[in-house]
Amino acid sequence: MSQEGVEARRAALRVLRAVSVGQPFEQALGKAIGPLGESDKRLAHELAAGVLRRRGDLDARLMPLARNGWGSVAPAIRDVLRIAAYQLTALDRIPAHAAVSTAVDLARAEAGDGAAKFVNAVLRNLGGRTAPPPLSIDPAGHLAAMHSHPDWLVARWLARYGRDDTLKLLEWNNTRPALVLQPARDDDAALAARWIAAGTPSAPAALGAGWLSPARRPSEVSGYAEGAFFVQDPAQAMVVRYASVTPGMTAYDAAASPGGKSIGLGRTARRVLSGDLGRDRVKRLAENLARAGSGREFAVVADALHPPVATADVVLLDAPCLGTGTLGRHPDARWRVSLEGLARILERQHALLRALAHVVRPGGWLVYATCSLEPDENEDQVNAFLADDRRFVRDPATTVPASLLTQDGDLRLLPHRDGTDGAYAARLRRVA
């Protein structure tokens, strides 16, 4: 095993440890892989994301092999075992002896010779790619264990979607997401010509919204520095289309970072005020707007509960949510969501809707969006708002395929149905 391969595994371990104390995956990954070479960056990413997506399954394989119980194993050693078990059960290209040897070395560095011997014994008994025994006769518990999702969330999905669609959704969440690029300063034709000239493969994304790229990072694709495109899943592109901003309108994007929706709005709007809370988030927002925006988007540090604008034709609230429609894109998020967290988020969403309603000019639109699959955060939240504020009515757009609309005319995208992230949006008009 090369030293470089060892460093990739050490980086993956650092990512998992950072995520375990609450750091977002992308932030933890960026810090951990910064000094690595390209091949090791890819391996570290694969290992850390793979462990997070399959943690329940990996633990089910490892737990019976911990003689004194899984609870007796130190958290760092659990992650060492998970990394090795993921290599042994999911990655054919990594020799078993290399996975075990590196895990033993990592355990020794973390906790000494005793931990190294323990890890060696567990992995020698893992048995390669044998399947774990069933853990539960409860359908939700069994699916949750096999596909590494919280039991309560799988139970909700089973009740809503049925077993077959729930299984498809779980499998989608455990698949590495594609990189999708949306046109910005280049249109679709110019992007296609640019990539053909550069020998860069691309293909249309789902719903014809953007382009699929095999690249790992957008900076590797021709046109990135010039702002020819920006990164955005088709689901979020559909939210922008659904907002139906026309030339001459002003827009306030109330939770704008990293800026994809603002850039999309800015392609037609006369002016877009792009706000977010936190200087680091706004710094990233401003960088993306400067690189790929139209020049009509303006980034500001602002709390959406206290809008920095008196009025706008369109207000877009991409509300904080559980993010259950993007668990495939954020492999750590599934281990943070909870019913308690849902209750807190519902209160904030309600408060944000009330605060932003005052900014919408009479005759204008409030577009409420989430990347959640949960009705509590979506149609239930909108229905409660409409019952409280009689100034607003639903005003569905016709700028997206009818198959993506609910009976009420709200936008809904489902990963297992549409091949995109999950998303929801309601378009509400303030009665003049």
Image (cartoon, rainbow, N blue to C red):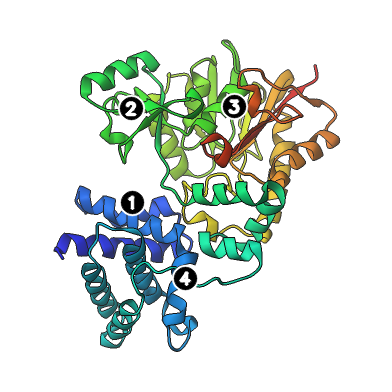
Mark 4 neighbour density, 10 Å: few (under 14) some (14–19) many (20 or more) = some
The kind of residue tagged 4 is: Pro
Query: Which residue is label 3 attached to?
Result: 252
Q: Position of residue 28 (x, y in %)?
A: 38, 56
Tell me, yes or no, whether the two marked residues, 2 and 4, touch with CB atoms within 8 Å.
Answer: no
Q: CA distance from mark 2 to mark 4?
A: 38 Å
Give left or right: position of 34 versus 354.
left
141, above or below 25, in the image: below
- The circle on residue 30 is 1
237, above or below 69, in the image: above
**Residue at 60% of width from left, 21% of height from top?**
400
- The circle on residue 132 is 4
Q: Sequence order check: which comes first, mark 2 or mark 4?
A: 4
The kind of residue tagged 2 is: Ser
Question: Looking at the image, how many numbered discs can be counted on the residues?
Answer: 4
Q: Quadrant of residue 341?
A: bottom right
Q: CA distance from mark 1 to mark 2?
A: 26 Å
Q: CA distance from mark 3 to mark 1?
A: 30 Å
